[in-house]
Amino acid sequence: MIDAHAHLGKWYNFYYDSGDFLSMVKIMDRIGMESAWISALMSIGPDYELGNEMVFEAIKAFPDRFKGYVTLSPYFADKIEEEIKKRISQGFIGIKLHPGTHMYPIDGATYLYAYKYADEHKLPVLIHTWGERDVRTVVELAKSYQNAIFIMGHSGGDLRSMLLAVDLARDVNNIYLDLTGSAMYNGIIEYYANKIGSERILFGTDFPFIDPRPAIGWVENSKLSEREKYNILQGNAKRILNSNK
Amino acid sequence: MRGYFDFNIMIGKPTIDPLNNWLNIDRLKEEMSRFNIKKALVYHSYSRDYDAYFGNERLTEEIKNFPNLYATWAILPIDISPIDTFDRLLEELKIHNVKAVRFFPDLHNFLLEEEVVGDLLSFLEGVKIPVLISPNSTGWKDIYNMLRNHPNIRLILIDLTYRQSSYIFPLLKRYKNVYIELSGYITFLGIETMYRKFGGERMLFGSNLPYKNPGSTIFYIEKADIPEEVKDYIAYKNADRLIQKVDL
Protein backbone atom coordinates (compact mmCIF):
# COMPACT_ATOMS: atom_id res chain seq x y z
CA MET A 1 0.00 0.00 0.00
CA ILE A 2 0.99 3.63 -0.50
CA ASP A 3 0.16 6.39 1.95
CA ALA A 4 -0.27 9.47 -0.24
CA HIS A 5 -0.79 11.83 2.69
CA ALA A 6 1.85 11.29 5.33
CA HIS A 7 4.17 13.51 7.31
CA LEU A 8 7.40 13.42 9.25
CA GLY A 9 8.40 14.64 12.69
CA LYS A 10 6.60 16.15 15.65
CA TRP A 11 3.61 18.40 16.26
CA TYR A 12 3.58 21.07 18.93
CA ASN A 13 0.36 20.41 20.82
CA PHE A 14 0.14 16.73 21.48
CA TYR A 15 2.33 13.81 22.45
CA TYR A 16 3.28 10.76 20.46
CA ASP A 17 6.31 8.54 20.60
CA SER A 18 9.00 9.02 17.91
CA GLY A 19 7.84 10.33 14.51
CA ASP A 20 11.28 10.33 12.90
CA PHE A 21 11.78 8.47 9.64
CA LEU A 22 13.34 5.42 11.28
CA SER A 23 10.29 4.90 13.49
CA MET A 24 8.12 5.33 10.40
CA VAL A 25 10.01 2.72 8.39
CA LYS A 26 9.77 0.31 11.30
CA ILE A 27 5.99 0.50 11.40
CA MET A 28 5.78 0.51 7.59
CA ASP A 29 7.66 -2.79 7.55
CA ARG A 30 5.34 -4.21 10.19
CA ILE A 31 2.17 -3.42 8.25
CA GLY A 32 3.41 -3.90 4.71
CA MET A 33 3.33 -0.27 3.63
CA GLU A 34 5.37 0.10 0.48
CA SER A 35 5.91 3.84 0.60
CA ALA A 36 4.70 7.06 2.17
CA TRP A 37 4.45 10.43 0.46
CA ILE A 38 5.61 12.82 3.12
CA SER A 39 5.71 16.46 4.04
CA ALA A 40 7.42 17.60 7.22
CA LEU A 41 5.36 18.88 10.11
CA MET A 42 8.13 21.42 10.56
CA SER A 43 7.23 22.84 7.12
CA ILE A 44 3.56 22.98 7.88
CA GLY A 45 4.57 24.73 11.08
CA PRO A 46 7.27 27.33 11.56
CA ASP A 47 10.00 26.60 8.97
CA TYR A 48 9.18 25.36 5.49
CA GLU A 49 12.83 25.27 4.45
CA LEU A 50 14.10 23.22 7.38
CA GLY A 51 11.13 20.88 7.01
CA ASN A 52 11.79 20.31 3.32
CA GLU A 53 15.39 19.53 4.20
CA MET A 54 14.17 16.94 6.73
CA VAL A 55 12.11 15.33 3.98
CA PHE A 56 15.13 15.29 1.70
CA GLU A 57 17.15 13.51 4.39
CA ALA A 58 14.43 10.86 4.69
CA ILE A 59 14.31 10.38 0.92
CA LYS A 60 18.06 10.05 0.73
CA ALA A 61 18.06 7.46 3.51
CA PHE A 62 15.13 5.44 2.13
CA PRO A 63 14.54 6.39 -1.50
CA ASP A 64 12.14 3.52 -2.11
CA ARG A 65 10.07 4.12 1.00
CA PHE A 66 9.57 7.86 0.99
CA LYS A 67 8.48 10.28 -1.71
CA GLY A 68 8.53 13.96 -0.90
CA TYR A 69 6.13 16.85 -1.22
CA VAL A 70 7.76 20.26 -1.22
CA THR A 71 5.86 22.36 1.30
CA LEU A 72 5.54 26.08 0.69
CA SER A 73 4.94 28.96 3.04
CA PRO A 74 2.85 31.84 1.74
CA TYR A 75 4.93 34.19 3.91
CA PHE A 76 8.04 33.66 1.80
CA ALA A 77 6.53 34.56 -1.54
CA ASP A 78 9.82 35.51 -3.15
CA LYS A 79 11.27 32.06 -2.37
CA ILE A 80 8.50 29.90 -3.74
CA GLU A 81 9.76 29.51 -7.28
CA GLU A 82 13.30 28.78 -6.13
CA GLU A 83 12.17 26.25 -3.50
CA ILE A 84 9.90 24.35 -5.88
CA LYS A 85 12.57 24.07 -8.57
CA LYS A 86 15.25 23.06 -6.08
CA ARG A 87 13.19 20.31 -4.45
CA ILE A 88 11.73 18.92 -7.65
CA SER A 89 15.26 18.64 -9.01
CA GLN A 90 16.10 16.68 -5.84
CA GLY A 91 13.39 14.16 -6.65
CA PHE A 92 10.36 15.49 -4.76
CA ILE A 93 7.18 14.37 -6.48
CA GLY A 94 4.69 17.09 -5.70
CA ILE A 95 3.66 20.17 -3.75
CA LYS A 96 2.00 20.41 -0.34
CA LEU A 97 0.01 23.44 0.82
CA HIS A 98 -1.49 23.85 4.25
CA PRO A 99 -3.73 26.91 4.19
CA GLY A 100 -5.07 25.91 7.62
CA THR A 101 -1.93 26.25 9.72
CA HIS A 102 -0.58 29.05 7.54
CA MET A 103 -3.90 30.89 7.71
CA TYR A 104 -3.82 31.79 4.06
CA PRO A 105 -6.51 31.36 1.42
CA ILE A 106 -6.16 28.42 -0.96
CA ASP A 107 -6.58 30.73 -3.93
CA GLY A 108 -4.37 33.46 -2.47
CA ALA A 109 -1.99 35.14 -4.91
CA THR A 110 1.18 33.68 -3.40
CA TYR A 111 0.05 30.14 -4.07
CA LEU A 112 -0.76 30.74 -7.73
CA TYR A 113 2.79 30.10 -8.94
CA ALA A 114 2.62 26.63 -7.34
CA TYR A 115 -0.52 25.77 -9.30
CA LYS A 116 0.99 27.11 -12.51
CA TYR A 117 4.14 25.04 -11.99
CA ALA A 118 2.14 21.92 -11.16
CA ASP A 119 0.03 22.49 -14.27
CA GLU A 120 3.08 22.82 -16.51
CA HIS A 121 4.73 19.71 -15.07
CA LYS A 122 1.62 17.60 -14.38
CA LEU A 123 2.47 17.36 -10.69
CA PRO A 124 0.25 16.46 -7.74
CA VAL A 125 -0.64 19.23 -5.32
CA LEU A 126 -1.86 18.05 -1.93
CA ILE A 127 -3.97 20.77 -0.31
CA HIS A 128 -5.30 20.59 3.21
CA THR A 129 -9.02 21.33 3.06
CA TRP A 130 -11.43 21.85 5.92
CA GLY A 131 -14.93 23.06 5.30
CA GLU A 132 -17.20 23.70 2.35
CA ARG A 133 -15.45 26.85 1.22
CA ASP A 134 -12.12 25.03 0.83
CA VAL A 135 -13.83 22.27 -1.14
CA ARG A 136 -15.41 24.75 -3.53
CA THR A 137 -12.12 26.62 -3.99
CA VAL A 138 -10.15 23.49 -4.84
CA VAL A 139 -12.77 22.48 -7.38
CA GLU A 140 -12.51 25.86 -9.11
CA LEU A 141 -8.69 25.71 -9.11
CA ALA A 142 -8.75 22.22 -10.60
CA LYS A 143 -10.92 23.50 -13.43
CA SER A 144 -8.43 26.31 -14.08
CA TYR A 145 -5.27 24.17 -13.93
CA GLN A 146 -6.38 21.03 -15.67
CA ASN A 147 -2.96 19.40 -16.06
CA ALA A 148 -2.19 19.58 -12.36
CA ILE A 149 -3.39 16.76 -10.13
CA PHE A 150 -5.29 18.12 -7.15
CA ILE A 151 -5.36 15.90 -4.08
CA MET A 152 -8.10 17.27 -1.86
CA GLY A 153 -6.60 16.67 1.58
CA HIS A 154 -9.20 15.22 3.99
CA SER A 155 -11.82 15.73 1.27
CA GLY A 156 -13.15 18.69 3.18
CA GLY A 157 -12.69 17.24 6.67
CA ASP A 158 -16.12 17.36 8.26
CA LEU A 159 -18.85 15.04 7.07
CA ARG A 160 -20.97 17.70 5.40
CA SER A 161 -18.02 19.01 3.43
CA MET A 162 -17.01 15.49 2.48
CA LEU A 163 -20.44 14.84 1.03
CA LEU A 164 -20.20 18.11 -0.89
CA ALA A 165 -16.70 17.25 -2.12
CA VAL A 166 -17.77 14.03 -3.76
CA ASP A 167 -20.63 15.78 -5.53
CA LEU A 168 -18.57 18.70 -6.81
CA ALA A 169 -15.47 16.68 -7.74
CA ARG A 170 -17.34 14.01 -9.68
CA ASP A 171 -16.96 15.69 -13.07
CA VAL A 172 -13.56 17.28 -12.45
CA ASN A 173 -11.21 14.47 -13.35
CA ASN A 174 -7.97 15.96 -12.05
CA ILE A 175 -9.23 15.87 -8.46
CA TYR A 176 -8.58 12.95 -6.14
CA LEU A 177 -10.40 12.61 -2.84
CA ASP A 178 -8.05 11.91 0.06
CA LEU A 179 -9.27 9.56 2.80
CA THR A 180 -7.05 11.04 5.50
CA GLY A 181 -9.05 12.00 8.53
CA SER A 182 -9.26 11.33 12.21
CA ALA A 183 -12.98 10.57 12.12
CA MET A 184 -12.90 7.71 9.57
CA TYR A 185 -16.67 7.66 9.18
CA ASN A 186 -18.13 4.24 8.71
CA GLY A 187 -19.51 3.85 5.19
CA ILE A 188 -17.94 6.95 3.63
CA ILE A 189 -15.47 4.94 1.53
CA GLU A 190 -18.30 2.92 0.03
CA TYR A 191 -20.26 6.14 -0.52
CA TYR A 192 -17.32 7.75 -2.33
CA ALA A 193 -16.66 4.69 -4.47
CA ASN A 194 -20.29 4.51 -5.46
CA LYS A 195 -20.46 8.20 -6.36
CA ILE A 196 -17.10 8.97 -7.92
CA GLY A 197 -15.46 5.56 -8.51
CA SER A 198 -12.56 3.94 -6.67
CA GLU A 199 -10.16 5.33 -9.30
CA ARG A 200 -10.53 8.81 -7.82
CA ILE A 201 -9.91 7.97 -4.16
CA LEU A 202 -6.46 8.10 -2.58
CA PHE A 203 -5.39 6.39 0.61
CA GLY A 204 -3.78 8.63 3.22
CA THR A 205 -3.45 8.60 6.98
CA ASP A 206 -1.55 11.68 8.26
CA PHE A 207 1.04 9.22 9.58
CA PRO A 208 2.82 9.79 12.04
CA PHE A 209 0.55 12.65 13.15
CA ILE A 210 -1.97 9.80 13.44
CA ASP A 211 -1.21 6.08 13.55
CA PRO A 212 -1.73 4.56 10.07
CA ARG A 213 -3.10 1.21 11.25
CA PRO A 214 -6.71 2.18 12.04
CA ALA A 215 -7.11 3.71 8.58
CA ILE A 216 -5.76 0.58 6.92
CA GLY A 217 -8.22 -1.56 8.88
CA TRP A 218 -10.98 0.83 7.85
CA VAL A 219 -10.26 0.44 4.13
CA GLU A 220 -9.45 -3.27 4.25
CA ASN A 221 -12.72 -3.97 6.04
CA SER A 222 -14.89 -1.74 3.89
CA LYS A 223 -17.52 -3.41 1.74
CA LEU A 224 -15.65 -2.80 -1.50
CA SER A 225 -14.35 -5.31 -4.03
CA GLU A 226 -10.70 -6.33 -3.90
CA ARG A 227 -10.14 -4.40 -7.12
CA GLU A 228 -11.58 -1.22 -5.62
CA LYS A 229 -9.47 -1.62 -2.48
CA TYR A 230 -6.39 -2.10 -4.65
CA ASN A 231 -7.14 1.12 -6.54
CA ILE A 232 -7.49 3.06 -3.32
CA LEU A 233 -4.61 1.55 -1.41
CA GLN A 234 -2.02 1.68 -4.17
CA GLY A 235 -3.21 1.58 -7.79
CA ASN A 236 -4.21 5.21 -8.04
CA ALA A 237 -1.05 6.45 -6.35
CA LYS A 238 1.08 4.41 -8.73
CA ARG A 239 -0.80 5.84 -11.69
CA ILE A 240 -0.16 9.39 -10.45
CA LEU A 241 3.53 8.68 -10.02
CA ASN A 242 3.82 7.16 -13.47
CA SER A 243 1.89 9.96 -15.13
CA ASN A 244 4.59 12.57 -14.53
CA LYS A 245 7.63 10.43 -15.25
CA MET B 1 -9.52 -15.10 14.38
CA ARG B 2 -9.44 -13.64 17.88
CA GLY B 3 -12.77 -13.14 19.65
CA TYR B 4 -13.72 -9.62 20.72
CA PHE B 5 -15.82 -8.05 23.46
CA ASP B 6 -17.07 -4.68 22.19
CA PHE B 7 -17.52 -2.05 24.89
CA ASN B 8 -19.07 0.63 22.72
CA ILE B 9 -21.99 -0.02 20.37
CA MET B 10 -25.15 1.98 19.76
CA ILE B 11 -28.34 0.54 18.30
CA GLY B 12 -31.37 2.47 17.07
CA LYS B 13 -31.86 5.47 14.82
CA PRO B 14 -29.89 8.57 15.79
CA THR B 15 -31.07 12.07 14.96
CA ILE B 16 -28.21 12.66 12.53
CA ASP B 17 -27.35 9.80 10.19
CA PRO B 18 -26.50 11.00 6.66
CA LEU B 19 -24.95 7.68 5.61
CA ASN B 20 -27.82 5.65 7.01
CA ASN B 21 -25.54 3.60 9.23
CA TRP B 22 -27.94 2.93 12.09
CA LEU B 23 -28.17 -0.58 13.44
CA ASN B 24 -31.14 -2.68 14.36
CA ILE B 25 -30.54 -5.99 16.06
CA ASP B 26 -30.32 -7.92 12.79
CA ARG B 27 -27.72 -5.59 11.34
CA LEU B 28 -25.82 -5.62 14.61
CA LYS B 29 -25.71 -9.42 14.61
CA GLU B 30 -24.32 -9.35 11.07
CA GLU B 31 -21.58 -6.94 12.08
CA MET B 32 -20.72 -8.95 15.17
CA SER B 33 -20.46 -12.11 13.13
CA ARG B 34 -18.34 -10.41 10.47
CA PHE B 35 -15.76 -9.24 13.02
CA ASN B 36 -16.00 -12.13 15.48
CA ILE B 37 -17.40 -9.90 18.22
CA LYS B 38 -18.61 -12.44 20.76
CA LYS B 39 -20.13 -10.07 23.31
CA ALA B 40 -21.04 -6.40 23.39
CA LEU B 41 -22.17 -3.62 25.65
CA VAL B 42 -24.93 -1.78 23.84
CA TYR B 43 -26.78 1.49 24.39
CA HIS B 44 -29.77 2.87 22.55
CA SER B 45 -29.82 5.99 20.38
CA TYR B 46 -33.15 7.03 21.92
CA SER B 47 -31.54 7.16 25.37
CA ARG B 48 -29.06 9.68 24.01
CA ASP B 49 -31.14 11.61 21.48
CA TYR B 50 -34.68 11.44 22.87
CA ASP B 51 -35.16 10.48 26.52
CA ALA B 52 -32.75 8.53 28.71
CA TYR B 53 -35.22 6.15 30.32
CA PHE B 54 -37.48 5.76 27.30
CA GLY B 55 -34.37 4.65 25.41
CA ASN B 56 -33.18 2.45 28.25
CA GLU B 57 -36.48 0.58 28.32
CA ARG B 58 -36.45 0.22 24.55
CA LEU B 59 -32.95 -1.18 24.79
CA THR B 60 -34.05 -3.83 27.28
CA GLU B 61 -36.85 -4.85 24.98
CA GLU B 62 -34.66 -5.07 21.89
CA ILE B 63 -31.80 -7.08 23.39
CA LYS B 64 -33.80 -9.36 25.71
CA ASN B 65 -33.35 -12.47 23.56
CA PHE B 66 -29.61 -12.04 23.10
CA PRO B 67 -27.60 -13.12 26.15
CA ASN B 68 -24.32 -11.94 24.62
CA LEU B 69 -25.59 -8.34 24.48
CA TYR B 70 -25.40 -6.37 27.72
CA ALA B 71 -27.30 -3.20 28.48
CA THR B 72 -25.56 0.12 28.92
CA TRP B 73 -28.01 2.61 30.37
CA ALA B 74 -27.86 6.32 29.88
CA ILE B 75 -28.11 7.73 33.36
CA LEU B 76 -29.25 11.08 34.74
CA PRO B 77 -28.64 12.94 38.01
CA ILE B 78 -31.09 11.60 40.58
CA ASP B 79 -32.87 14.99 40.90
CA ILE B 80 -34.03 14.88 37.27
CA SER B 81 -34.44 11.15 36.95
CA PRO B 82 -37.77 9.30 36.87
CA ILE B 83 -36.02 6.74 39.08
CA ASP B 84 -35.53 9.09 41.98
CA THR B 85 -34.13 6.94 44.79
CA PHE B 86 -31.04 4.78 44.89
CA ASP B 87 -33.00 1.79 46.17
CA ARG B 88 -35.20 1.97 43.10
CA LEU B 89 -32.23 2.54 40.83
CA LEU B 90 -30.50 -0.53 42.24
CA GLU B 91 -33.64 -2.56 41.69
CA GLU B 92 -34.04 -1.34 38.08
CA LEU B 93 -30.42 -1.99 37.20
CA LYS B 94 -30.80 -5.54 38.55
CA ILE B 95 -34.09 -6.24 36.79
CA HIS B 96 -32.77 -5.02 33.46
CA ASN B 97 -29.41 -6.75 33.82
CA VAL B 98 -27.57 -3.48 33.24
CA LYS B 99 -23.80 -3.93 33.12
CA ALA B 100 -22.61 -0.38 32.47
CA VAL B 101 -23.93 3.18 32.53
CA ARG B 102 -23.19 6.13 30.39
CA PHE B 103 -23.30 9.88 31.08
CA PHE B 104 -24.08 12.45 28.41
CA PRO B 105 -23.49 15.69 30.36
CA ASP B 106 -23.48 17.98 27.35
CA LEU B 107 -26.40 16.51 25.44
CA HIS B 108 -28.51 15.99 28.56
CA ASN B 109 -27.52 19.37 29.88
CA PHE B 110 -26.20 18.76 33.37
CA LEU B 111 -22.94 19.44 35.17
CA LEU B 112 -20.60 16.74 36.30
CA GLU B 113 -20.22 18.55 39.62
CA GLU B 114 -20.36 16.97 43.05
CA GLU B 115 -23.58 18.85 43.90
CA VAL B 116 -25.26 17.35 40.83
CA VAL B 117 -23.95 13.80 40.53
CA GLY B 118 -21.87 13.24 43.68
CA ASP B 119 -24.43 10.94 45.34
CA LEU B 120 -25.00 9.06 42.10
CA LEU B 121 -21.28 8.56 41.55
CA SER B 122 -20.90 7.24 45.11
CA PHE B 123 -23.67 4.76 44.40
CA LEU B 124 -22.08 3.67 41.11
CA GLU B 125 -18.70 3.40 42.79
CA GLY B 126 -20.26 1.08 45.37
CA VAL B 127 -21.78 -1.32 42.86
CA LYS B 128 -18.59 -1.42 40.80
CA ILE B 129 -20.40 -0.77 37.56
CA PRO B 130 -18.40 0.64 34.64
CA VAL B 131 -19.21 4.29 33.94
CA LEU B 132 -18.64 5.40 30.34
CA ILE B 133 -17.93 9.07 29.71
CA SER B 134 -16.55 10.94 26.74
CA PRO B 135 -14.23 13.68 28.03
CA ASN B 136 -15.32 15.69 24.98
CA SER B 137 -18.81 15.79 26.43
CA THR B 138 -17.78 17.44 29.67
CA GLY B 139 -14.15 18.61 29.66
CA TRP B 140 -11.04 17.11 31.18
CA LYS B 141 -11.15 19.25 34.31
CA ASP B 142 -14.50 17.70 35.18
CA ILE B 143 -13.03 14.23 34.74
CA TYR B 144 -10.13 15.10 37.02
CA ASN B 145 -12.45 16.59 39.65
CA MET B 146 -14.72 13.59 39.51
CA LEU B 147 -11.87 11.20 40.11
CA ARG B 148 -10.54 13.26 43.02
CA ASN B 149 -13.91 12.82 44.72
CA HIS B 150 -14.55 9.26 43.54
CA PRO B 151 -11.14 7.65 43.10
CA ASN B 152 -12.48 4.10 42.95
CA ILE B 153 -15.08 4.60 40.26
CA ARG B 154 -14.67 2.27 37.28
CA LEU B 155 -14.33 4.97 34.69
CA ILE B 156 -14.17 4.08 31.01
CA LEU B 157 -12.98 6.97 28.86
CA ILE B 158 -14.64 6.76 25.46
CA ASP B 159 -14.58 8.78 22.22
CA LEU B 160 -10.97 9.73 22.83
CA THR B 161 -8.84 11.41 20.19
CA TYR B 162 -5.22 11.12 19.12
CA ARG B 163 -4.40 14.41 20.82
CA GLN B 164 -5.25 13.47 24.39
CA SER B 165 -2.36 11.43 25.84
CA SER B 166 -1.33 14.35 28.03
CA TYR B 167 -4.70 14.17 29.77
CA ILE B 168 -5.00 10.38 29.83
CA PHE B 169 -1.59 9.31 31.15
CA PRO B 170 -1.75 11.08 34.56
CA LEU B 171 -5.14 9.50 35.21
CA LEU B 172 -3.95 6.01 34.35
CA LYS B 173 -0.92 6.52 36.54
CA ARG B 174 -2.93 7.70 39.54
CA TYR B 175 -6.23 5.78 39.38
CA LYS B 176 -6.19 2.02 38.96
CA ASN B 177 -9.84 1.84 37.87
CA VAL B 178 -9.53 4.16 34.87
CA TYR B 179 -9.71 2.41 31.51
CA ILE B 180 -9.62 3.60 27.92
CA GLU B 181 -11.77 2.40 25.05
CA LEU B 182 -9.57 2.38 21.98
CA SER B 183 -11.75 3.30 19.00
CA GLY B 184 -10.82 6.97 19.00
CA TYR B 185 -7.33 6.70 20.46
CA ILE B 186 -5.46 6.56 17.16
CA THR B 187 -2.28 8.18 18.40
CA PHE B 188 0.88 7.05 16.60
CA LEU B 189 2.18 3.97 18.43
CA GLY B 190 -0.55 4.61 20.99
CA ILE B 191 -1.18 1.00 21.95
CA GLU B 192 2.53 0.25 22.23
CA THR B 193 3.14 3.35 24.33
CA MET B 194 0.19 2.62 26.58
CA TYR B 195 1.37 -0.96 27.09
CA ARG B 196 4.91 0.13 27.88
CA LYS B 197 3.76 2.69 30.44
CA PHE B 198 0.76 1.04 32.06
CA GLY B 199 0.54 -2.57 30.88
CA GLY B 200 -2.33 -4.02 28.87
CA GLU B 201 -4.96 -4.41 31.59
CA ARG B 202 -6.73 -1.12 31.08
CA MET B 203 -7.20 -0.94 27.34
CA LEU B 204 -10.58 -2.09 26.04
CA PHE B 205 -11.72 -2.86 22.55
CA GLY B 206 -14.65 -0.76 21.38
CA SER B 207 -15.86 -0.31 17.83
CA ASN B 208 -18.06 2.77 18.21
CA LEU B 209 -20.52 1.17 15.83
CA PRO B 210 -22.40 2.41 13.89
CA TYR B 211 -20.14 5.43 13.53
CA LYS B 212 -16.93 3.51 12.90
CA ASN B 213 -15.92 0.32 11.19
CA PRO B 214 -14.86 -2.26 13.82
CA GLY B 215 -12.10 -3.40 11.46
CA SER B 216 -10.29 -0.18 12.15
CA THR B 217 -9.55 -0.81 15.84
CA ILE B 218 -9.22 -4.55 15.33
CA PHE B 219 -6.46 -4.00 12.77
CA TYR B 220 -4.72 -1.60 15.15
CA ILE B 221 -4.76 -4.20 17.94
CA GLU B 222 -3.79 -7.11 15.73
CA LYS B 223 -0.83 -5.24 14.25
CA ALA B 224 0.38 -3.80 17.56
CA ASP B 225 3.90 -4.67 18.62
CA ILE B 226 2.86 -6.19 21.95
CA PRO B 227 2.62 -9.82 23.16
CA GLU B 228 -0.21 -11.89 21.72
CA GLU B 229 -1.58 -12.72 25.17
CA VAL B 230 -1.89 -9.01 25.93
CA LYS B 231 -3.95 -8.63 22.76
CA ASP B 232 -6.32 -11.28 24.13
CA TYR B 233 -6.84 -9.15 27.22
CA ILE B 234 -7.43 -5.98 25.23
CA ALA B 235 -9.72 -7.74 22.80
CA TYR B 236 -11.87 -9.59 25.29
CA LYS B 237 -10.63 -10.52 28.73
CA ASN B 238 -10.34 -7.06 30.28
CA ALA B 239 -13.94 -6.29 29.35
CA ASP B 240 -15.25 -9.64 30.50
CA ARG B 241 -13.53 -9.27 33.86
CA LEU B 242 -15.00 -5.80 34.36
CA ILE B 243 -18.51 -7.05 33.66
CA GLN B 244 -18.15 -9.98 36.02
CA LYS B 245 -17.20 -7.66 38.86
CA VAL B 246 -20.42 -5.64 38.68
CA ASP B 247 -22.03 -6.07 42.09
CA LEU B 248 -25.74 -5.31 41.88
Image (cartoon, coloured by chain):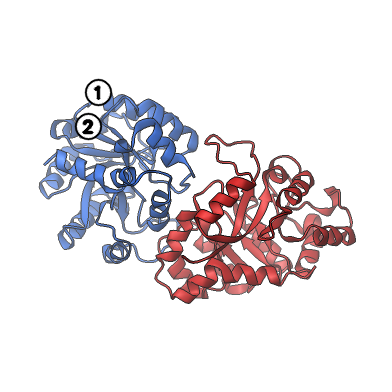
* Residue A157 appears in the picture as rendered: no
**Would you call the spot at circle 1 few (<14 residues within 10 Å), some (14-19), or many (20 or more)?**
few
**Would you call the spot at circle 2 few (<14 residues within 10 Å), some (14-19), or many (20 or more)?**
many
- Chain identifier, colour blue: A
Say whether marks 2 and 1 touch (CB < 8 Å).
yes
Q: Which residue appears at 23% of the width and 34% of the height? A: A149
Label 2 amino acid?
Tyr
Residue B55 versus residue A163 in the image, above or below: below
**Disc 1, SS:** helix
* Residue B186, x across and y down, in percent: 46, 57
Label 1 resides on the chain identified as A
Task: Kindly report the distance in space between the C-alpha atoms of the residues bearing marks 2 and 1.
Answer: 9 Å
* Residue A104, x across and y down, in percent: 35, 35
Q: Which residue appears at 84% of the width and 57% of the height? A: B92
Q: From the viewer's perspective, is B114 left or right of B165?
A: right
* Residue A6, x across and y down, in percent: 31, 51
Task: Tell me the mark number nearer the camera, choosing from 2 and 1.
Answer: 1
Dividing the picture into quarters, in which one does residue B131 lie? bottom right
* Residue B54, x across and y down, in percent: 78, 44
Label 2 resides on the chain identified as A
Colour assigned to chain B in the rendering is red
Residue A76 versus residue B111 in the image, above or below: above
Label 1 amino acid?
Ser
Q: Which residue is mark 1?
A: A144
Q: Which residue is mark 2?
A: A115
Dividing the picture into quarters, in which one does residue A105 lie? top left
Q: From the viewer's perspective, is B178 left or right of B189?
A: right
* A97 vs B34, nearest the viewer: B34
